[in-house]
Image (tube, rainbow, N blue to C red):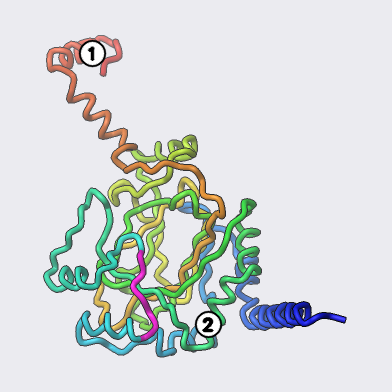
Amino acid sequence: MLNSTQANHRDTSTSKAGVQSELMGEFGYLIEKIERAEFRQDPFRFVLIDDFLSREHFDQIVSLEQIRRPVAKSTEVLVSDLLNSGYKVQHFPGCTTSVKDYLACYNSKKWPTDKGLLEGYGLTFRMHEYRAPLLARLVEFLNTPEFQVALERKFGIERPCYVETAIQKYLHGYEISPHPDIRKKAATYMLNINTSAESEKVDIHTHLLTFRPERRYLYDFWRHNPEVDRCWVPWDWCETKLETRTNNSIVLFAPSDDTLHAVKLAYDHLAFQRTQVYGNLWYTVEPDARTVSYRDIDLRAQTKNLRSAVPLPIKRLLKKLTKRGIPGL
């Protein structure tokens, strides 16, 4: 006979197993889509799936009150509306967490961004209260061990990690310049759940990029220096190969030395907001990698500085030697 503690444990385990079984029955088709999806290789290895959610699920989700907010008369009204709708300001790269500072910049159109830092000054909101059962179930499913294992199998991830998925809205000004993602990320996925058909036409989407020929040495640099973390780089070091504009599409990839992606929002967020299901797999044990700036790995600038330090008479001599077939500087 079971004692009360054992009985409660069995009841809890049975209840949890039942919930997971129900979630798999409702959303298990998403795992099947990921398993069947073929990898694309240009500009790097990734998966892009259109019509990820079923038409029924997608239509329901983008019609939910927490996702489809009314047109706002001002950004102040929009911010207040989101805060009252179960969202909180999220600490996020390319963003500030100060509503006051953001509104001051938005209204004055003066952004205190240091382009040397390659970071925008947007505002990101994360849903913390799931008022619609469908949203709660979807996010719960995407945080299950079953979904995590599916991603681990898809991308060949063997080290221990954990999954984190949330729903986020991003306002104008959010920007992250091209980057491959830091080494503690095992996988990244972003699902577009925008409420307007116009969303596919405006500049709110993730860019997938490649380095320009003169910067491709960075692929080798990151590959051969695992003790150095990957960093953000200037936009003009790269060229965009693809933008993930399609609504209800999901992009998934395992961060590596070539997974350059970026985003820059320049749009009117009063009518609708860029909305995503955003998730990552994070390694449980973070790699021991030191942080560097793009300036530290800018070999072209360092070579230019070296050239400028050479006295003019020496430059002239080297030029003469070069003309005679003797390698110069």
Amino acid type assigned to the residue bearing label 2 in the image: Ala
Residue 265 x/y as whole percent: 29, 67
Tell me if mark 2 has few (under 14), some (14-19) or many (20+) residues whose alpha carbon lies within 10 angstroms of its own. Answer: few
* Distance (Cα) linking label 2 and label 1: 72 Å
Task: Determine which of the numbered discs, if any, sits on residue 323 in the image.
Answer: 1
Q: Position of residue 131 (x, y in %)?
A: 46, 88
Quarter location, residue 125: bottom left
In the displayed structure, would residue 118 be above or below residue 203? above
Mark in front: 2 vs 1: 2
- 7 is higher (above) or lower (below) than 153: below
Q: In the picture, which quadrant includes the C terminus?
A: top left
* Quadrant location of the N terminus in the rendered image: bottom right
Disc on res. 65: none
Residue visible at 37% across and 82% down? 197
Which stretch did the figure color magenta?
85-91
- Give whichever of discs 2 and 1 has the lower sequence position: 2
Q: Residue at x 17, y 62 (%)?
A: 111
Residue drawn at the location 64% of the way across and 52% of the way down:
158
